[in-house]
Amino acid sequence: MLSEIIAECLIAIPAVFVVVDPIPAVPFFLAMTKDDSPAKREATARRAAMVAFGLLAVFALSGSVIFRVLGISLGAFKIAGGVLLLLMAIDMLRIHPSPARITPGEIEAGLVKDDVAIVPLATPLLAGPGSIATVVVLMARTRSGKVWHAIPVLIAILLTTAASYLLFSGAARVERFLGHTGMNLVERASGLLLAALAIQFVIDGSAEVMPAVVHFLR
């Protein structure tokens, strides 16, 4: 069991981290908290990470119920999630804020809000549609009726949101260390990995959907 959990963690952790992508979110955090004291920034970072963890964990654990209620097949959801992630990846490769992750209106609203921890930092910046789709698909891939199969995905969510908290709470140091060029390099590398993950989701979803399509056409 332990070896299986470790193997699944090695898949889930990088996948969730790449989709949440907290490093390029650092400039947004700094812009939205530019007038805050260090203590308030730290509190905002902590709340954003905790709310993001809660949202992603809830969707990961309830994804199968949502599928049953709405009559959505896992294959169809994988294809939809893959297309969404691919759109995000293309914007990341172009070093362009993806509207699929956070819209210009949400960025502008965050610049004038007093409290930005929940909206837009926790959601949609960290726990947005792409992140939610990813954790739901990962949970569905590991689900086999055994409770412990949820552990790798929950660990991935926990570690990613904890890393987001650390990056946000030390945002000024992170930006100085990486610099503009470093941030762009991380963004492009993450975009490339995200594009590969998106294509894999589409391939997996198509493989699951095609037998049903062929049967229907017959």
Image: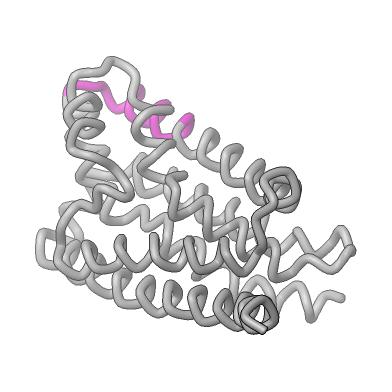
Can residue 145 be found in the magenta stretch? no
Q: Is residue 163 above or below residue 211?
A: above
- The residue segment tinted magenta is 35-47
Q: Residue at x 60, y 38 (%)?
A: 54
What colour scheme does the image use? one colour
Q: Image check: 60 left or right of 20? A: right
Residue 68: x, y in percent? 75, 50
Q: Nearer the viewer, residue 29 or 92?
A: 92
Instruction: State left or right for residue 135 relative to residue 125.
Output: right
Image position, residue 10 (x, y; %):
61, 76
User: Which quadrant would the C terminus be assigned to in this image?
Assistant: bottom right
Q: Main secondary structure of the magenta part?
A: helix
Residue at image position (34%, 32%) is 120
Front residue (pair 70, 61): 70
Q: Is residue 38 magenta?
A: yes
Q: Residue furthest top?
A: 114
Residue at x 43%, y 45% (from the top left corner): 128
Image coordinates of residue 176 in percent, x first then y, are 16, 53
Q: Quadrant of residue 152?
A: bottom right
* Horizontal and vertical percent position of residue 37: 26, 22
Residue furthest left as drawn: 180
Residue closer to the observer: 209 or 96: 209
Q: Vertical placement of 99 versus 55: above or below? A: below
Against 89, is 213 above or below?
Answer: below
| Residue 124 position by quadrant | top left
For this rendering, which residue is in front, 139 or 77?
Answer: 77
Residue at 84% x, 62% y is: 148
Q: Tell me the quarter of the image containing the N terminus.
A: bottom right
Q: Residue furthest front?
A: 218
How many numbered tags mark residues here? 0
> Quadrant of the rendered structure where residue 118 is?
top left
Question: With 45 as the anchor, is 49 left or right in this view?
Answer: right
